[in-house]
Image (cartoon, rainbow, N blue to C red):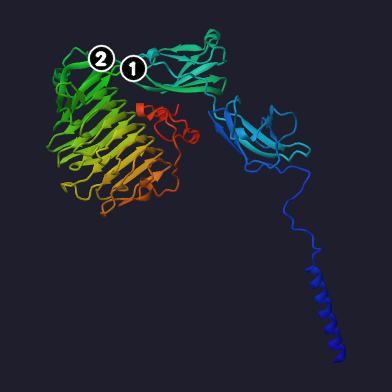
Amino acid sequence: MNKLLKKFTYIVGMAAAIFAAGCSDDIDPEITSLNVNQLFSPVGLDARVVNKTSVRLNWNSVKNAKTYTIQFFENGNQDFSGTPVREITGVTYDVVPYTVTGFGGETSYSVRIKAVGEDITDSKWVSATFKTDAEQIFYNVNPEEITAFTVVLRWPAGEVATSITLNPGNVTHTVTSSEVAAGMAEITGLAGETNYTATLLNGTKVRGTVTFRTLVDIGDAIAVHPEDDLKAAIDAAQAGDVLVLFPGVYTVLQGDIEINKSITIKGLYPHNKPIIYNRFVFSAGVENVTFRDLEMVGTYGSDPVIKLAQAFFFNAGTYNVNSFLVEGCTIRGYNQALIYGGSAVMKIETLTFNNCVVSNIINDGGDFIDFRSGHVVKLTITNSTFNKVAAAPRDFIRLDNSSGSFPGSTSAVVIDRCTFYEVSNGRRILYVRFVNNTSTISNTIFAGAEATYGGYYSNQAATTQPVCSKNNYFNAASFLSGVTNGKFDISGTHTSYNPGFVNAASGNFTVTNEELQINGIGDPRWLQ
């Protein structure tokens, strides 16, 4: 027992001595820094292809690094043996993200980067891979060099190419040495009013891609000139006729034009649209209607100033419209709505707005796309810009079925790649109350509007949450918050970048934000 007590006393004494030594003032100071003789490696390296054949590099800064060295190797497997195809030294962090241009098209590359300092060893390399897109050396097609059957395509003089293919039709043009020297080729034998994609090739490698639309082949179409009476021409047309309007200002008739048959009305030149001051009113007998490449203005005169209520109006009556297409049109200055359905028993199977610019429609007394009666089965809005519309405030889209004439019907809305500026300020984008309705909104910019009612109408069972994807909201936060009724976008894929519009006040919505450019968000006309 005494032996055990002695051993226990000894252990306690030793522990106390060790504890006392640990609490002495002679302990080493706290380690507050790590002193090494080599820089840490950059982390977070991201290599993203931009503008087809350039790469944007991003990485985190390294403490004590003065510059960075970047090397590129022409392979996609991070093999860094041999000589790099390009080396860049002396890159400072204040230029990050750092864009490097001039790579070959459709080529895989490995890239590596290291930090460089003074009186310290360089960091170890970090690496990534990327693959460029096909080159794009085609210039945009000059509208003056397009006819119904031909087009002139241009690229930088001297840039080598062997052929040009055009589709549809699989048209092939062999590029001559003189065309290479001039950077220009004229393609013939095309079809009128056709959307073509032209591909410039050097052997099998793509050097450029461009799209264009050939002009109207007047053929059997009815030619209409500015000095003609547009209403008389439409009245005289037969069902299914095509009217082609030559450039100029149409002032012989201003006001309503009633249409009770299927018809197509289009401008001859997309780049020089005819200007008309009319509202089109539709009645029974209309089945298929197309408006293309027109400039429609709803305000005219000075004493007094006349403001037309809508661009398009559907009269009362029982009739079904198969297709209603508005494409490539500029529409502005109407007072009440873009389009209004005033018939409780009228049905439109497909209503489409594509490649349009619509501005300054205040919507005094009506919603912007307003079918509180009648039935639109599918509404599609693509590649278009809406500037200061539905600002009274009113709803952008109203498909209401308030008459109850279409019980159990389905209504679908699709909005894709559009730019909205000061739209439905203080109201909603969607007011859709058909049973089984669906709404899909994607790749669209919403800027400069606050939706007091939360983006969509959500206080009834007939309203469905819209399916949103990759939209951008700038100064339009209430579309996301659901102030009163409907939280508009719950996708989690949305962003809130400042688009950096070049001059929104003058209607120039060219996007300067690189993230939106890269991801193709907004009306494509502003992403060039």
In the image, residue 299 sits, relative to residue 449, either above or below, namely: above
Secondary element under disc 1, as helix, strand or loop, is loop
Report whether residue 160 is seen. Answer: yes
Marker disc for residue 10 = none
Furthest residue in direction left, as rendered: 317
Quote the CA–CA distance across marks 1 and 2: 17 Å
| Total marks placed | 2
At 80% from the left edge and 72% from the top edge, which residue is drawn? 20
Nearest the eye: 198 or 56: 56
Q: Quadrant of residue 284?
A: top left
Q: Which mark is residue 248?
A: 2
Q: Disc 2 marks which amino acid?
A: Gly
Tell which tag, 1 or 2, sits nearer the viewer: 2
How far from the left and from the top, in percent, is residue 260? 14, 28
Residue, disc 1: 215
Quadrant where the image shows the C terminus: top left
Give, as a three-letter code, the residue at label 1.
Leu
Q: Is 23 positioned to the left or the right of 241 in the image?
A: right
**Residue 483 screen position, x and y as percent:** 33, 51
Q: Of helix, strand and loop, which one carries label 2?
A: loop
Which residue is rendered at x = 29% and y = 19% of the image? 273
- Observer-nearest of 347 and 327: 327
Horizontal side of 103 relative to 218 (left or right) equals right
